[in-house]
Amino acid sequence: MIELFISAFATLFVVIDPPGCAPIFAGLTSGADEAHRRAMAIRAVFVAAIILVVFALFGRALLTGLGISLYSFRIAGGIMLFLIALDMVFEKRTERREDRAEKVKGGDPPPDIAVFPMAMPMIAGPGSIASVMLLMSHSETYREQLVVFAALAVILVLTLVALLAAGPIMRIVGAKIEAVISRLLGVLLAALATQFVIDGIRAALVAARAAGVH
């Protein structure tokens, strides 16, 4: 259970990237007062939590309805996370996030950026949605699923803390240190993604042998 929690925590931390969300949130809410900024941070994490929990609970049923096996999803999810890891290592993911934030900020920004772009796609984006579904597909018992939800809850709390402390964090961390951390996390995510692909292929081969397919 501890290994599952660490794996789920590491995967979700790297994909959701609470420290990386902080500067985006700080830039989008630079003109808001403290109370409004705090309310938007809480609302963004709350909406993202609902989205991720829904996909975690009903993602497997959706796959079954579409005729997609869990093995295929594990392999596809691992490849997807590997591509995200490459973006992080080569700083492409941060650039896209900043470009998206500038477009929202540069035009006529909505009065409340909690739902878009913070809740989705910044926090509950394609990568994090795929990650929770992938982790739940690895969880065969209710206890294992609870462990995944516990890891998700911790990550969302850390994300909320990062958003609330966005200003001070940016002053302390700085852009250069944030870039180094992002690349290191990208390497970690690449290793985890590779393991997901290996597990998916191994499980598919075991199932094929059990079914008598050679």
Image (spheres, helix red, strand yellow):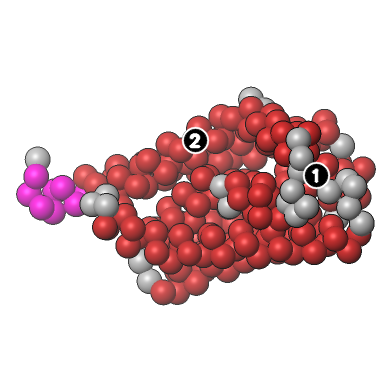
What stretch of residues is rendered in magenta? 206-213
- Regarding residue 166, the answer to whether it shows in the image is yes
Mark 1 and mark 2 lie on one chain; the one further toward the N terminus is 1
Q: Secondary structure at mark 1?
A: helix
Q: Is residue 132 above or below residue 83?
A: below
Q: As drawn, is 171 to the left or to the right of 210?
A: right
Label 1: few (<14), some (14–19) or many (≥20) C-alpha neighbours in 10 Å: many
Taking the spot 55% from the left edge, 36% from the top edge, the residue there is 84
Give coordinates of residue 76: x percent, y percent.
Answer: 37, 40
Q: Amino acid at mark 1?
A: Leu
Taking the spot 62% from the left edge, 62% from the top edge, the residue there is 47
Residue 185: which numbered mark, if any? none
Q: Secondary structure at mark 2?
A: helix
Q: Nearer the viewer, residue 16 or 97?
A: 97
Q: As drawn, is 180 to the left or to the right of 77?
A: right
Q: Magenta stretch containing residue 77, yes or no? A: no
Q: As drawn, is 169 to the left or to the right of 150?
A: right
Label 2 belongs to which residue? 82
Q: Amino acid at mark 2?
A: Phe
Cα separation, mark 1 vs mark 2, equals: 29 Å
Query: Could you tell me what secondary structure mostly forms the magenta stretch?
Result: helix
Q: Is residue 45 above or below residue 27?
A: below
Label 2: few (<14), some (14–19) or many (≥20) C-alpha neighbours in 10 Å: many
Give coordinates of residue 93: x percent, y percent.
Answer: 63, 33
Outermost residue on the bottom side: it is 142
Give coordinates of residue 140: x percent, y percent.
Answer: 35, 66
- Circles 1, 2 touching at the beta carbon (< 8 Å): no
Give coordinates of residue 197: x percent, y percent.
Answer: 38, 41
Residue 28: which numbered mark, if any? 1
Taking the spot 56% from the left edge, 29% from the top edge, the residue there is 86
Outermost residue on the front side: it is 108
